[in-house]
Image (tube, rainbow, N blue to C red):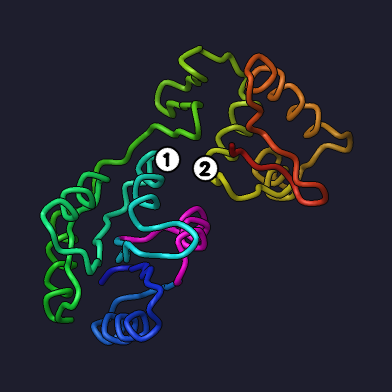
Amino acid sequence: MAKILIIEDNQDIRYNLVDFLEAKGHQTDNTDDGLKALALLTMQQFDIIVLDIMLPGMDGISLCRELRARGNETSVLFLSAKDTVADRIEGLSTGADDYLVKPFSLAELELRIGAILRRGKRPASHILQVADIVMNLDELTVMRAGNPIRLNPMMFKILRMLMHKSPSVVTRDEMEHELWGDDRPDSDSLRTHIHNLRAVIDAPFDKSLIKTVPGFGWTLRE
């Protein structure tokens, strides 16, 4: 049985999918908005995403591209009323695993999901990318606009958290817990580390990507 995220803005279709898949023993979560889905996918792991293409917030094609750019290789099954060969090619070229045209039978949906799950998960990607920043988690390297960036271990951890959650906000509490656990420093060490990270990630470049969200924390986005 699989953990499935259903992203569909048609409420009737979404609830039908939830009821059908849960009756088959799967665990589901669902949303009707692409940006909400992106936030969910930064906090939870799923075995497969059932993804409508026409969505508010962020369309399915853009969402799939964004997930692959971030190194998220969760299997994706597109749902779409668009049925031309060009539409299918566009969907599959984003890194999706399958493309199912509406209207479809729930039995066929179940077969497609089963086929994807039998193929197994994609090999995990160890590259994170946000805008022109690229982090290699195997080699522990960071590049921005093709230029190597030298980071100490603390700055690397902070940037990794920001990239994993981008464009969502990483709260101060989340960051301090990740860096120090329950043994948090008394001084304002975190702000110092953020300042040092900005000095090498943002200061030498035309566009600043690390943003402060007053009263909450920080985010990495254009």
- Is residue 210 shown in magenta? no
Would you say residue 38 sits in the magenta stretch? yes
Please tell me whether residue 22 is drawn above or below residue 95 in the rendered image: below
Packing grade of label 2 (10 A; few <14, some 14-19, many >=20) is many
Residue 127 location (% of width, % of height): 39, 32
**What residue is disc 1 on?**
70
Where residue 117 appears, x then y in whole percent?
Answer: 19, 61
Identify the residue at image location x=33%, y=37%: 125
Left or right: 126 in relation to 213: left
| Sequence-first disc among 1 and 2 | 1
Q: Which residue is mark 2?
A: 164
Q: Please name the predominant secondary structure of the magenta segment in the image.
A: helix
What residue range appears in magenta?
A: 32-47
Residue 112 shows in this picture: yes
In the rendered image, the vertical position of residue 205 relative to residue 98, given as above or below: above
* Quadrant in the picture for the N terminus: bottom left
Instruction: State which quadrant residue 218 falls in.
Output: top right
Please state if 187 lies on the left or on the right of 135 as rendered. Answer: right
Q: Secondary structure at mark 2?
A: helix
**How far apart in space, not on screen, are marks 1 and 2 (Cα)?**
7 Å
In the depicted structure, whether residue 179 falls above or below residue 40: above
Q: Position of residue 10 (x, y in %)?
A: 38, 79
Q: Are marks 1 and 2 in contact (CB under 8 Å)?
A: yes
Amino acid marked by disc 2: His
| Residue positioned 38% across, 68% down in the render | 7
Residue type at tag 1: Arg
